[in-house]
Image (spheres, rainbow, N blue to C red):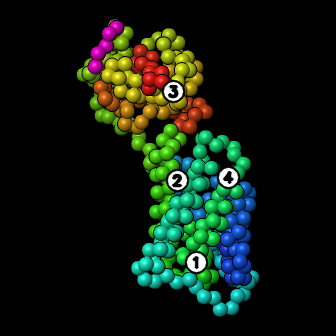
Amino acid sequence: MRKYVTEFIGTFGLVFTVGCAVMSGSPFAPLAIGAALMVLVFAGGHISGAHYNPAVTLGVFLRGKLPLGEGGPYWVAQLAGAFIAAWLAKFTVNPGLIHALSTSGAHEIFSAMFAEFFFTFALVYVVLNVATSKDQPGNQFFGLAIGFTVAVGTFAVGGISGGAFNPAVAFGAMLMGLLNWGNFYIYLIGNLVGAAVAALAFKYLNPDDVLEGPLVRKPRLATAPAAATATATGPTTTPEEYHVLRQAGTEAPFTGEYTDTKARGVYHCRACGAGLFSSDSKFESHCGWPSFYQPKAGDAVVLLEDRSFGRVRTEVRCANCGSHLGHVFEGEGYEVPTDQRWCINSVSLRLAPAENA
């Protein structure tokens, strides 16, 4: 509930500032709006992430940093904040006759939609990179970057589209009479599509940082029985390799070549050479086998239900040749991004050092 209250307060503050600054005719409205967003982001970022914008919420969800079940309540809180702020801003300023920005004609509609698309893309792209990237943990400038993005966009295209970049702001502006209700689709489409494209761009540019969410390719769950590794292809050279790769065996704990290895590179399947795990996802689990928190790519491995030894586990196999690799466990409490431990036999792997990976 704290998150939703924070989203309500932040969106209220943003839309109230928009209404008062614009309806009072201030030439510094874009600066006021950007500054208001900046301070509200600093105020609520540690609680809710400080979205204050359904488009940002969509982008953060697609990026994998917001559970699906929280998206709806975030949107409700944001729209409720915008609704109340719009009426209070209009009551406070009491501007008299308001001339709504109305867009008609193919060229004007396209221009307004593209303006909303581009600056919403820019806003969400900035949010994802400065506030959610693993490469910038605990940075202190994200509010400033986000606020200035909105200020720049409002200065640049405010006269073309109104400079909403936010369906909640557009909703509030329409309640105040600043925008035409007939143009709501411009903001809905432009803002949400811009957010989705920004999430896709973030994933493309930061593939190792997007570990959860709808944009992540999940390892596919196969239906073959665990004993089917005998049909796998690829060479094995030692009895131990054959036992593990072909018979789904397990090497003795704390004896594997890569259990404690910290060298950088890519771990390949020892049988076929397919790339399976990056050293960036390797961590110390102290379980006796090499541990990773994710495969190099979701389609590099396949998962199978394993009922051997009287319990249910999830077996991991090489997707290319079918060789047994190990098992994956989750919910064990390790402090890793995915809450998973991919427990892999050293004998199933071969490390290609970074310069050769």
Residue assigned mark 1: 159
Within-10-Å neighbours for mark 3: few <14, some 14–19, many 20+: many
Decide if residue 351 is on the left or right side of residue 83.
Answer: left
Residue assigned mark 4: 142
Q: Nearer the viewer, mark 4 or mark 2?
A: 4
> Of helix, strand and loop, which one carries label 4?
helix
Task: Tell me the quarter of the picture where residue 274 sits.
Answer: top left
Q: Amino acid at mark 1?
A: Gly
> What's the CA distance linking mark 1 and mark 4?
27 Å
Q: Nearer the viewer, mark 1 or mark 3?
A: 1
Q: Earlier in the sequence, mark 4 or mark 2?
A: 2
Residue assigned mark 3: 279
Badge 3 vs badge 2, beta-carbon distance below 8 Å: no
Q: Nearer the viewer, mark 1 or mark 4?
A: 1
Q: Earlier in the sequence, mark 1 or mark 4?
A: 4
The residue lying at 43 percent from left, 13 percent from top is: 251
- The x and y percentages for residue 134 are 60, 41
Range of residues picked out in magenta: 234-238
Q: Nearer the viewer, mark 3 or mark 2?
A: 3
Q: Please tell me which residue lies in front, 108 or 307.
A: 108
Q: Amino acid at mark 3?
A: Ser
